[in-house]
Image (tube, rainbow, N blue to C red):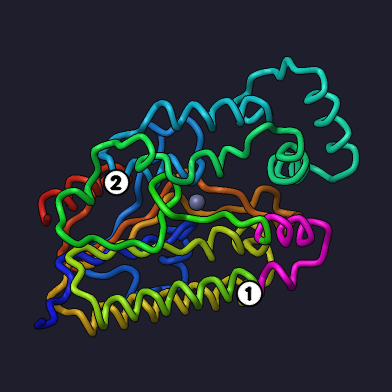
């Protein structure tokens, strides 16, 4: 069988921050044209509903509701929480931890213990489980290593456990886990690009989201090395697959939640670039590009 390079390669970089791509002049990531994506139509800026919207062409209200309800519990939508134990829990967390960081700890650590269901687990394979028409259907042999809210992205128990330890101050095992996971995902991508005949390759990594939560306010080098690595990977893909359309996209960026604290949270814009010169304005418009090229 003769090898055919993919028609389209999407490099999905969770948490890739537009302002850092500019600040650090990451020319490979910028490609021919790059732009900021507007997230104002997304009720809460959270990973799975944004990724799924790229594949289905609109924001799925059912999936968004799962995360809106979750944000309400956390007080994140500005609504006063009515559940008494949540109120007390938030109060205690705010006393134990300084400033706004308590919200993050509440969101990621305390609240999940009490929740019946983890919304991230519930959302993991949402588009496939609900059989929602999606952009993969425009291709004969699409491939992905897993996309949150779409299909196949695993948020493992080990990941959760190590994140918990990182919050408590022991961040090395979590960092190592995320870097190892990135290396495995990168190897999968390179193997698939080299050996298989896929017409769409949609690769995903969440290293910048996970480590961004910890490192956005740390000495610049810590996060920068991962941005440089991604920049190099984009350059490699473009150089070796010159006939493929290459899109780089993120679901949101990262910003510091408090100037005095290292912790970061999602910023209210995302990133997009293409080697064709095409641009879009919202994440869900990626669907149209995938449709047109399928
Ligand atoms: Zn994300």
Find disc 1 in the rendering and name its residue: 222
Q: Nearer the viewer, residue 228 or 122?
A: 122
At a point 69% along the width and 18% down the height, the residue shown is 80
* Marks 2 and 1 close (CB-CB < 8 Å): no
Q: State which quadrant residue 163 falls in.
A: bottom right
> Could you tell me residue 56's position as x and y percent?
28, 40
Left-right relation of 152 to 53: right
> Could you tell me residue 188's position as x and y percent?
39, 75
Of circles 2 and 1, the one toward us is: 2
Q: Is residue 172 magenta?
A: yes
Left-right relation of 245 to 168: left
Magenta range: 159-176
At a point 82% along the width and 23% down the height, the residue shown is 85
Left-right relation of 206 to 100: left
**Does 55 sit above or below residue 66?**
below
> Could you tell me residue 30's position as x and y percent?
31, 68
| SS class, disc 2 | helix
**Does 47 sit above or below residue 248?**
above
At a point 62% along the width and 25% down the height, the residue shown is 72
Mark 2 Cα shell of 10 Å, populated few (<14), some (14-19), many (≥20): many
Find disc 2 in the rendering and name its residue: 55
> Could you tell me residue 190's position as x and y percent?
34, 80
Q: Is residue 256 magenta?
A: no
Q: Is mark 2 within 8 Å of ligand 1?
A: no
Q: Earlier in the sequence, mark 2 or mark 1?
A: 2
Mark 1 Cα shell of 10 Å, populated few (<14), some (14-19), many (≥20): some
* Residue at the extreme top of the image, as rendered: 82
Left-right relation of 80 to 145: right
Q: How many marks?
A: 2
At a point 21% along the width and 63% down the height, the residue shown is 200
For the residues marked 2 and 1, what is the alpha-carbon distance in whole angstroms? 32 Å
User: Split into 4 quadrants, where in the image is the N terminus?
Assistant: bottom left
């Amino acid at each position: 069988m003769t090898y055919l390079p993919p028609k389209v390669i999407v490099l999905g970089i969770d948490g890739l921050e537009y302002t850092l791509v500019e600040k650090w002049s990451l020319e490979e990531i910028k490609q021919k044209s790059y732009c900021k994506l507007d997230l104002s139509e997304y009720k809460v800026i959270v990973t799975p509903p944004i990724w799924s919207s790229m594949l289905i062409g609109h924001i799925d209200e059912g999936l968004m509701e799962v995360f809106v309800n979750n944000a309400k519990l956390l007080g994140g939508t500005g609504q006063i929480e009515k559940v008494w134990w949540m109120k007390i829990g938030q109060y205690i967390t705010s006393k134990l931890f300084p400033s706004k960081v308590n919200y993050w700890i509440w969101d990621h650590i305390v609240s999940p213990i009490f929740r019946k269901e983890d919304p991230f687990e519930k959302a993991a394979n949402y588009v496939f489980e609900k059989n929602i028409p999606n952009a993969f259907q425009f291709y004969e042999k699409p491939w992905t290593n897993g996309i949150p809210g779409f299909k196949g992205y695993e948020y493992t128990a080990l990941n959760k456990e190590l994140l918990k330890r990182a919050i408590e101050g022991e961040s090395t095992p979590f960092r190592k886990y995320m870097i190892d996971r990135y290396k495995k995902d990168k190897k999968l991508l390179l193997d698939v690009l080299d050996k298989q005949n896929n017409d769409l390759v949609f690769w995903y990594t969440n290293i910048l989201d996970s480590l961004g939560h910890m490192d956005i306010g740390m000495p610049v080098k810590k996060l920068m090395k991962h941005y440089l690595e991604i920049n190099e990977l984009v350059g490699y893909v473009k150089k070796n697959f010159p006939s493929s359309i290459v899109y780089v996209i993120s679901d949101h960026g990262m910003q510091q939640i408090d100037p005095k604290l290292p912790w970061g949270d999602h910023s209210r814009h995302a990133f997009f670039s293409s080697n064709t010169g095409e641009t879009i304005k919202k994440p869900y418009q990626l669907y149209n590009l995938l449709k047109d090229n399928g």
